[in-house]
Amino acid sequence: MLKEDLILKNPLRVLSPADQGKAAAPRMGLVMSRAGLGKTAILVQIALDSMLRGNKVLHVSIGQSLEKTKIWYDDIFQDIARACNLERAAEIQEELMSQRMIMTFNEESFGVAKLQERLKDLIDQKIFLPDCLLVDGFDCSISPEKVLGQMRELAKDMNINMWFSAVCHRGDERVSKTGVPAPCHEADALFDTIILLQPDPKKKCIALNIIKRDGEVGGSKPSLTLDPSTLLILEKC
């Protein structure tokens, strides 16, 4: 398979193209699940798709090391390359990783002001100007509306799309009217696309429940799943 075919046949194409890379207006997306179901794998595949289409991606990793985050990218890309029999895989991988920057934070140190400061340094020094920003491990339990409101303003000011991952907990039954579980249930209006990962024991895979897509709730929902062995997104289980 050629690089162009990989872009066209990516299962993420069933989502609005505005969900990845640059768009006419910035978008914010959220991936939620219990711990260990594949949120990071989803974000990495969103990032790879964006980079394949020529965009620069800044991956903000909260509570995870730089090396571990790099391994996620290497493993996911190699699995995709093998599954699709991608031509010139090593060359394409090297090209893509030059379009990605990873920024790490401790869980206690992450904040919008600090992120803005580090972003400003990257841009002012002409080191890296992202088209898409991912925040992996976002804590929705602490003033989510205020923090996410600030992040949305940042996305608007920089004209970039943002994706977040956040953990929901089995014992917390709070949920928004649109079906978004706590602790992000009070901030669902700030997101344009929301994906909830839910295990499907009958099919032995993980369903991507697309609660909200490109600002719309309800309507037809694309059928996407996550292969639990490779953590690759599939159009069917």
Image (tube, grey):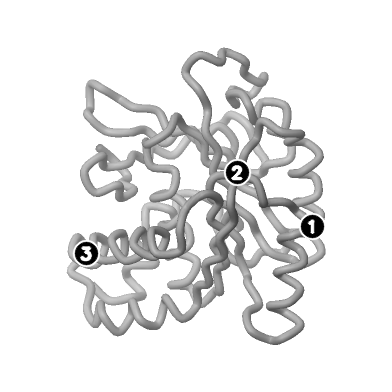
In this rendering, which labeled residue sits more in front, label 3 or label 2?
2
Q: CA distance from mark 3 to mark 2?
A: 32 Å
Q: Residue shown at 52%/41% (left/top)? A: 31
Disc 2 marks a residue whose amino acid type is: Phe
Q: How many marks?
A: 3
Residue 138 disc label: 2
Name the amino acid type tagged 3.
Cys
Residue named by callout 1: 113
Mark-to-mark CA distance, 1 and 2: 15 Å
Q: Tell which circle, 3 or 1, labels the residue nearer the N-terminal end.
A: 3
Label ID, residue 84: 3
* Residue 12, position as x, y percentages in the image: 43, 53
Q: Are marks 3 and 1 in contact (CB under 8 Å)?
A: no
Q: Nearer the viewer, residue 66 or 90?
A: 66
Lower position in the chain sequence, tag 3 or tag 2? 3
- Image coordinates for residue 95, horizontal then vertical, percent: 40, 82
Q: Return the mark for residue 41.
A: none
Task: Please report the residue visible at 65 percent of the width from the left and 35 percent of the height from the top.
Answer: 140
Q: Is residue 67 above or below residue 42?
A: below
Q: Residues within 10 Å of mark 3 (few under 14, many from 20)?
A: some
